[in-house]
Amino acid sequence: MTPKEIELFFHHLAAANPNPQIELDFINAFTLLVAVVLSARATDKGVNKATKKLFEIADTPQKMVDLGEDGLSQLINTIGLYRSKARYIIELSKRLVQDFGGEIPTNREDLESLPGVGRKSANVILNTIFHEPVIAVDTHILRVANRTGLAHGKTPLEIETQLMARVPAHWRLQAHHWLVLHGRYICQARKPLCPRCPVREECHYPYKTTVI
Ligand code: SF4
């Protein structure tokens, strides 16, 4: 995609959704981190259903430690891989209490040192909580980038590196949200909804659909 096409691409996404929001429910930085860990290979909807009750009980690292792994597991057992996720969340809560005074670290290195937190999760926190213009590449962004020609690569890091170089600075803070939502609702994996796509003019995908 040319720089001009990329500019128009984000211009159209912004026009269609001027204020894109993350779809995971959270009430503070800690609960967002927990929701992000829970969302691995799970839908935001399924996570939100489970965290409604959980966050009423445990919205700080200390309360999560007090709830314990068994108590947490019972509250999140509708989510895939809940046992290992519960273990990670209790371990990361302990680390936050012991090493960070119960606060969420503000830098990537410390975030990624937490159990269960990888580069993508750290990027979600850095972007949503600390307003850093980083792009958390998930399966939707990987697909949208490759289809449209926005970036090309097999791994999230390859795509992230290219997007960070190509997406103009004035779009970068919101780019993550626009791309995720676009992949989730328009440029869907099985059948992209090209006839109602706001960026079909800029998109380079050779197999655009013509009917919905
Ligand atoms: S035109 Fe189709 S393939 Fe291209 S971004 Fe839009 S939905 Fe995806």
Image (cartoon, rainbow, N blue to C red):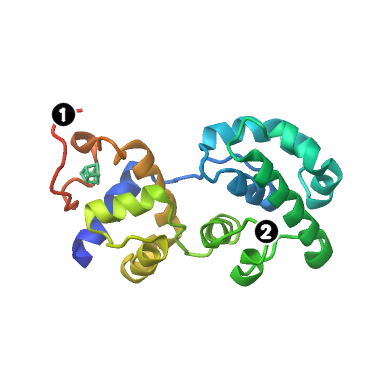
| Res 84 seen here | yes
Look at the image and tell me in which quarter the C terminus lies. top left
Quadrant position of residue 172? bottom left
- Closer to the chain start, of discs 2 and 1, is 2
Identity, as a three-letter code, of the amino acid under mark 1: Val
SS assignment at label 1? loop
Q: Say whether mark 1 is within 8 Å of ligand 1.
A: no
Q: Nearer the viewer, residue 155 or 56?
A: 155
Above-or-below relation of 181 to 155 = above
Q: Nearer the viewer, residue 78 or 175?
A: 78
Quadrant for ligand 1?
top left
Callout 1 environment at 10 Å: few (<14), some (14 to 19), or many (20+)? few
Give the residue at mark 1: 211
Above-or-below relation of 144 to 184 = below
Question: Could you say where residue 68 lies in the image, as x and y percent from the top left?
Answer: 82, 43
Q: CA distance from mark 2 to mark 1?
A: 45 Å
Callout 2 environment at 10 Å: few (<14), some (14 to 19), or many (20+)? some
Nearer mark to the viewer, of 2 and 1: 2
Identity, as a three-letter code, of the amino acid under mark 2: Pro
SS assignment at label 2? loop
Question: Could you say where residue 118 lies in the image, as x and y percent from the top left?
Answer: 56, 60
Above-or-below relation of 183 to 6 = above
Position of 131 with respect to 87 (left or right) is left
- Residue located at (19% from left, 45% from top): 200
- Residue located at (20% from left, 38% from top): 194
Look at the image and tell me in which quarter the N terminus lies. bottom left
Question: Could you say where residue 139 lies in the image, as x and y percent from the top left?
Answer: 40, 49
Q: Nearer the viewer, residue 23 or 118?
A: 118
- Residue located at (78% from left, 51% from top): 61
Give the residue at mark 2: 115
